[in-house]
Image (cartoon, grey):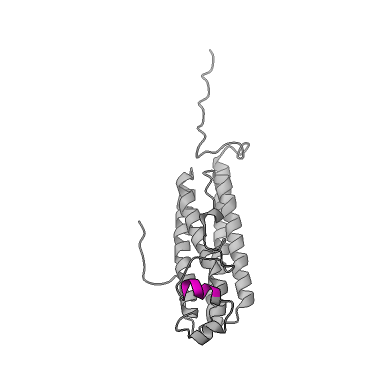
Amino acid sequence: MFHYEKKLQFPVKIATPNPKLAAFIISQYGGPDGELGASMRYLSQRYSMPYAEAKGLLTDIGTEELGHMEMVAAIVHQLTRNLTDEEVRATPAFAPYFVDHTTGVYPTAASGFPWTAGSIQSTGDPIADLTEDLAAEQKARVTYDNILRLSDDPDVNNVIRFLREREIVHFQRFGECLRLCKEKMDTRNVYLTNPAFDKIQPRPAAQG
């Protein structure tokens, strides 16, 4: 059960609409390394994690990513509010999105490819899943880096920098969680067994 607070984790207050910039930023809503995929990945993976600490971390970060989705959606909405026909026609980068969605917020990549669960994985193996999570956070950080290279709007950049910093924190937390899981497993065989699936066989009784 989730508790919803009617405020964003970081305020989004953009003074100047910019549909061209919105066409880039939408990738962190529904792109292959965006916040929607992150939240679905972590909230799905948590069920097969064999240790309470890992379950808790994935629940916490997956829930935070839902809040980040909301922040990215707010950015896109504020960048495209009250547009005129002339402004849309003057922005070729935004026009294809406008044809399909007007100024609604839709989960898609900047390339125009809509979000798909094919961009995430949940294997049921803690080593595989946490390693993917580490990579996911780095890819999201790179996407935010690229947005900052394209954006000259300080109102947007303040929010993007906050989101980028959270990707770095999440990467660190997943690294700690991966080490913890390896410590709890048989460290000689962490790549040969899956504690979420493989059952530990009891040792045979000593022959007397």
Image label count: 0
Note whether residue 157 is visible: no
The residue under the point 44% across, 60% down is: 63
Q: Determine if the magenta segment contains residue 98.
A: yes
Q: Quarter-wise, where is residue 118 in the image?
A: bottom right
- Residue 199 in the image: state x and y as whole percent: 50, 32
The residue under the point 60% across, 73% down is: 147
- Residue 139 in the image: state x and y as whole percent: 61, 61
Q: Is residue 111 above or below residue 198?
A: below
Q: Is residue 96 above or below residue 196?
A: below
Q: Main secondary structure of the magenta part?
A: helix
Residue that sits furthest to the front in the current view = 99
Residue that sits furthest to the top in the current view = 208
Q: Quarter-wise, where is residue 141 in the image?
A: bottom right
Which quadrant does the N terminus fall into?
A: bottom left
The residue under the point 51% across, 31% down is: 200
- Residue 62 in the image: state x and y as whole percent: 47, 58
Q: Is residue 100 above or below residue 128?
A: below
Note whether residue 24 is visible: yes
Q: Determine if the magenta segment contains residue 6.
A: no
Q: Which residues are magenta?
A: 96-102
- Residue 207 in the image: state x and y as whole percent: 54, 14
The residue under the point 50% across, 79% down is: 79
Of residues 175 and 89, the one drawn nearer to the viewer in this rendering: 89
